Amino acid sequence: MHLEVNNLYKRFPTRRGSLLALDNINLHIEEGEFVCAVGASGSGKSTLLRLIAGLEMPSSGEILVDREPVCGPGSDRGMVFQNYTLYPWMTVAKNVGFGLKLQGISTSERRDRVAYYLEIVGLSQFAHALPNELSGGMKQRVAIARALASRPKILLMDEPFGALDVQTKEMMQQFLLQIWEQTGTTILTITHDVEEAVFLSQRIYVLSARPGRVREEIKIELPGERTQGMRRSPAFQQYK
Ligand code: ADP
Ligand code: MG
């Protein structure tokens, strides 16, 4: 997959006129890349992700997924939010499978995928638990399994570990890297935590605030074994 954001502007109406939240954003993300965008609170990170997810319309500019313009949400983009957004009345398995049902995927395929992705996130034993019975880190793993289950071309994460304590957050960061290596999924994670961005990603876009603008692009040299491990992984080959 290939994500391209060209000359993206987003203006919100306000009582006294309007607020420019995104001011000419340009991004390119290639197949299999793990990219982070960092910025202070109010720099337009969530707005950018919501636009890419198709939950909001740009004021101008374009967003292309595999050279097709984004118009509305789609199963090619999986979304993970900071506050998990699980349905509290549905079991873990139902939460993971619900979107697949909406996509019209057959019952047996759904069952297979739910089992597969719950195993990937290490929560097979919790398939029948309710979200409230899980810790924050586990809830976020359910949300990640749910996002992966529809086999998106790109995983979009909005401050995914912001609500977790430091120890859980570090575990989840390790875990997300494993998922990336195992599945080869393209990932764009938004965070205000520069250390997190450096730890996770191969490339970082730095956004400045008021209005949100790409100030800088930083490339991170990965330790060789990380990328090679990913390419060797049978799951990665299968996924492609
Ligand atoms: P971040 O996620 O980086 O903290 P946001 O994307 O949430 O930033 O917000 C960027 C700016 O856009 C902020 O000034 C915020 O108040 C404004 N904003 C975001 N969503 C809306 C909205 N729906 N209506 C009006 N203003 C908004
Ligand atoms: Mg935000």
Image (cartoon, rainbow, N blue to C red):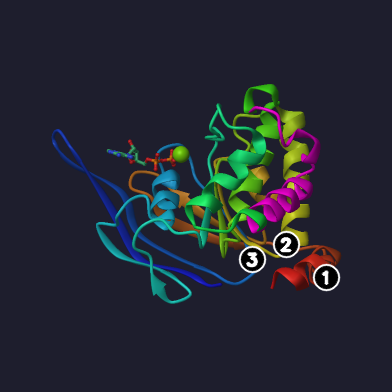
Residue occupied by mark 3: 33
Residue occupied by mark 1: 228
Find the distance from the CA under tag 3 to the CA under tag 2: 12 Å
Q: Residue at x 78, y 38 (%)?
A: 171
Which quadrant would the N terminus be assigned to in this image? Answer: bottom right
Quarter location, residue 43: top left
| Sequence-earlier tag: 2 or 1 | 2
Q: Residues within 10 Å of mark 2 (few under 14, many from 20)?
A: many
Residue occupied by mark 2: 183
| Sequence-earlier tag: 3 or 2 | 3
Give the image location of residue 144, x and y in percent: 64, 46
Callout 2 secondary element: helix
Give the image location of residue 224, x and y in percent: 83, 68
Confirm or reject: label 1 Cβ below 8 Å from ligand 2. no
Q: Is residue 126 magenta?
A: yes
Q: Amino acid at mark 2?
A: Thr
Looking at the rendering, the stretch of residues picked out in magenta corresponds to 109-130
Q: Is residue 175 magenta?
A: no
